[in-house]
Amino acid sequence: MTANEDQEMELEALRSIYEGDEGFKEVSPVSFQFRIGGLEDTKAFILDITWPETYPDTAPQISLDAFFNNRISVETKQLILSKLEQQVEANLGTAMMYTLFEWAKDNQEALMENHKPVMSTASTSSSEVTNTISTAKKKEKKEQLTKAQKRRIINRTDNKGELPRGWNWVDVIKHLSKTGGKDDD
């Protein structure tokens, strides 16, 4: 079989195996992404694998440069890549994508045991900017009064902004005249 026939057969097998799997993405017929771990998993990572023209006789290109992997330290990425290279060399000349994906899934804990999340300065500064903007918007928002509401407030208050003594007595007197006093019993 030629390299292209091997690639077509492996591509067909990968499509049938990982159909409906959210962790597998076919970027192109020779490039794939596979997420090891769940979306919420802090030790999850994405493998980017691209086939050269002579794959499977030559090793595929494996990368961890996906944006999803930005929180993984360089040392951890190098460890993962070196372990995967060992698996590639052991399987060279055969269809190895399924083997690599499953090996990575099975050994995720061992590969990520020294993982310490890296916080990038760009993401921190953008979140700080977002927080600053949101608090500024909260401060700016005041209760908007209509002109009529403002006039009523001004007419009720004196020059100090306080309501005059007895401003609501009329309401009390109206209420008592409708309900009756103690003498009515």
Image (tube, rainbow, N blue to C red):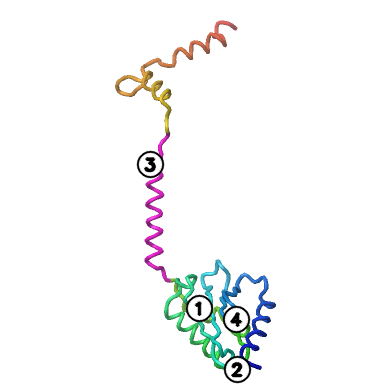
Q: Identify the magenta region.
A: 118-143
- Residue displayed at 50% across by 82% down: 80
**Distance in Å between CA atoms under marks 3 and 2:** 66 Å
**Distance in Å between CA atoms under marks 1 and 2:** 28 Å
Q: Amino acid at mark 3?
A: Glu
Residue bearing mark 3:
140
Up-down relation of residue 89 to residue 101 (above or below): below
Q: How packed is label 4: few (under 14 Cα within 10 Å), some, or many (20 or more)?
A: some
Residue 18 lies in quadrant: bottom right
Name the mark on residue 93.
Answer: 2
Circles 2 and 4, Cβ within 8 Å, touching? The answer is no
Q: Tell me the element at label 3.
A: helix
Q: Amino acid at mark 4?
A: Phe
Farthest residue, direction right:
16
Residue bearing mark 1:
112
**Distance in Å between CA atoms under marks 4 and 3:** 52 Å
Q: Earlier in the sequence, mark 4 or mark 3?
A: 4
Q: Earlier in the sequence, mark 3 or mark 2?
A: 2
Q: How packed is label 2: few (under 14 Cα within 10 Å), some, or many (20 or more)?
A: some
- Viewer-nearest of discs 2 and 4: 2
Name the mark on residue 101.
Answer: 4
